[in-house]
Amino acid sequence: MHGELLDPLTEAVPRDWDRFVTSAGAPVLWRAAPLTTAAWASQSATALAVVRDGTDVVALFHARFLGVGGYRAYHRAGSTTRAGFIECRLAPASIAGHLFAAGLDAAGKRAAVLAFERAARARHRVAGFCYRHVETDDLAAFDRRTRRVLAVSPDSVLSAEWSSVEQYLNSLPAKWRSQLRKMRSGITATRAIVDTVPTDEAARLISLIRFRHQRPGVVRTPVPEHYIEHLNADPATRFATYSDGSGLLALSTVHDNGIDLTMSYWGARDRVDGDVANLYFDHYVDLVAHTISLGRATLRPGKGMARIKERFGARPVASHLVVGW
């Protein structure tokens, strides 16, 4: 296997990138256009990598260069910070930055990771690698004697085992079911699942949530409006929204691959901006209803807020961080 590393700001992304994304059933977040838009808005240099076995694409990687310099330092397009780790994560989303071909066995996955790392070292001085959101079945592909594997906040999956929302609510613990119904009856905002959202409002609300939850020392740039345009244009992406006369109050993004629904971004107003209580809890019920109506097998609410998601019936899926040379 051999890897090809490229800078989306200065080099064309090969056409088989998007073809592979489609064949893998990955969400629009993996497509070249939104990733390139995100790269232009990022404070870190971005790299895309295609790994081929002969002429066939077997894996994709999305990485960022995390250098030791200050994030405000100017870097010309196409350059990278000096020395530092390569972090493999699909930014600005918070999902794994590796995508393997369906049916690729453990040995093939390991070979693909090695090909990516060879390509990275051939072009840049690399202090080490950091792989985020690695599931248990893929650990062997990334682990080495010189690396540490750390258990991190789990992912979550909710299996759609019901034929109606009422049946789903009845499956929840009585106290939580009662609380949810009370919350839902008290919300007067207009609920809707829509194909598109106002790009300016959606980008602002998603960015507000990102800033609210960023950790000390972590820099997150705003999500560009153009990035939301790519999501609007994708027929497999929809939005659970809340609005009133003043505009968009909150939104959640969900991607459909024909089998699963995968949630990515949540955005909502701040208290000083006229937020409405309990929309975060309420929107899960709406998306379970959407999952049932489409006949999809599972709803994947993503990482974070694991205990809350378990209250909705989601089961945790172990996730790991692999870091080292």
Image (tube, helix red, strand yellow):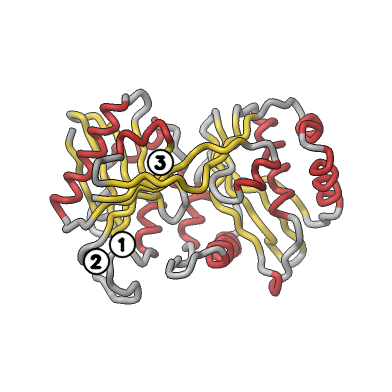
Sooner in the amino-acid sequence: mark 3 or mark 1:
1
Q: Residues within 10 Å of mark 2 (few under 14, many from 20)?
A: many
Q: Residues within 10 Å of mark 3 (few under 14, many from 20)?
A: many
Dot label at residue 66: 1
Q: Is residue 228 above or below residue 292?
A: below
- Residue positioned 16% across, 51% down in the render: 121
Where does residue 269 sit, x and y in percent of width and height? Answer: 66, 65
User: Given contact means CB atoms under 8 Å apart, are the residues at marks 2 and 1 in contact?
Assistant: yes
- Residue positioned 33% across, 47% down in the render: 148
Along the line of sight, which residue is nearer the eye, 308 or 108?
308
Along the line of sight, which residue is nearer the eye, 274 or 193?
274
User: Given contact means CB atoms under 8 Å apart, are the residues at marks 3 and 1 in contact?
Assistant: no
Query: Which dot, 2 or 3, sits closer to the camera?
Result: 3
Residue that badge 3 annotates: 134
Dot label at residue 229: none
Q: Is residue 299 above or below residue 38?
A: above
In terms of secondary structure, where does tag 1 sit?
A: strand
Residue that badge 2 annotates: 81
Residue extending farthest left: 122
Examine the rendering and report whether any part of residue 200 can be seen: no
- Residue positioned 28% across, 65% down in the render: 67
Alpha carbon distance from label 2 to label 1: 7 Å
Where does residue 234 sit, x and y in percent of width and height? Answer: 50, 44
Q: Residues within 10 Å of mark 1 (few under 14, many from 20)?
A: many
> The residue under label 2 is which amino acid type?
Thr
Q: Is residue 89 above or below residue 208?
A: above
> The residue under label 3 is which amino acid type?
Val
In terms of secondary structure, where does tag 3 sit?
A: strand
In terms of secondary structure, where does tag 2 sit?
A: loop
Examine the rendering and report whether any part of residue 266 can be seen: yes
Where does residue 273 sit, x and y in percent of width and height? Answer: 69, 72
